[in-house]
Image (cartoon, rainbow, N blue to C red):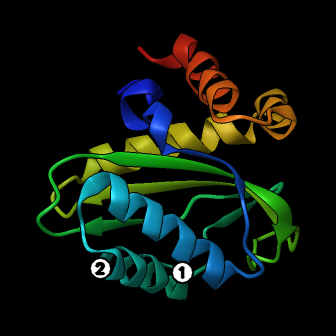
Amino acid sequence: MPLADLVAPNAILPALKANSKKQAIQELAAKAAELTGLPERDIFDTLLQRERLGSTGVGAGIAIPHGKLPKFDRLFGLFARLDRPIDFDALDGEPVDLAFLLLAPETAGANHLKALARVARLLRDPGTAQKLRASRDATALHAVLTQAAAPNAA
């Protein structure tokens, strides 16, 4: 699945304001609820449950909060560039300023894992991360996400 199919242009937050990991997850859940029609509380609770298993802060300033939801029928991505880095209990101890929320149906199986791997590869690419940090508006951020992913879309 190409990243362009996973994250729509309206699912980009160019300057998310959050003072904590919990607040960032709350803001991501609120926007995801708005775009998916799912209850915000269900999304938030699913993401928090996943965080309790271990931080989704994967290092290098990147977090990929994710979870599976019942009664959801597709993979959904939402990208946020934080207005300032926050502590996310990341594996490397570094604060997070780039977050990619990934939601999947409970039945997604391998598709969920493939999407997670694709997002992780993309965001961990130093050139892509640098472009995302330099981009200030949703259109530019979406372009970086989808153009950077295009060569690997096959």
Q: Residue at x 45, y 18 (%)?
A: 153
Q: Residue at x 87, y 34 (%)?
A: 134
Q: Is residue 125 left or right of residue 28?
A: right
Q: Residue at x 30, y 46 (%)?
A: 75
Q: Position of residue 52 (x, y in %)?
A: 52, 88
- Mark 1 vs mark 2, CA separation in Å: 14 Å
Identified by mark 1, the residue type is: Glu
- Reading the image, the residue beneath label 1 is 51
Image quadrant where residue 86 sits: bottom right
Q: Badge 1, how many Cα within 10 Å: few under 14, some, many 20+?
A: many
- Numbered disc in front, either 1 or 2: 2
Identified by mark 2, the residue type is: Asp
Up the image or down, 116 lies above or below 131; here it is below
Quarter containing the N terminus: top left
**Frontmost residue, 38 versus 3:** 38
**Frontmost residue, 4 versus 90:** 4
Q: Position of residue 38 (x, y in %)?
A: 24, 66
- Reading the image, the residue beneath label 2 is 42
Q: Is residue 48 left or right of residue 108?
A: right
Determine whether the residue tagged by mark 1 lies in a helix, strand or loop. helix
Q: Residue at x 78, y 79 (%)?
A: 19
Determine whether the residue tagged by mark 2 lies in a helix, strand or loop. helix
Image quadrant where residue 44 sits: bottom left
Residue at the extreme left of the image, as rendered: 71
Q: Position of residue 9 (x, y in %)?
A: 49, 32
Quarter containing the C terminus: top left
Q: Badge 2, how many Cα within 10 Å: few under 14, some, many 20+?
A: some
Q: Which mark is residue 3?
A: none
Marks 2 and 1: in contact by CB < 8 Å?
A: no
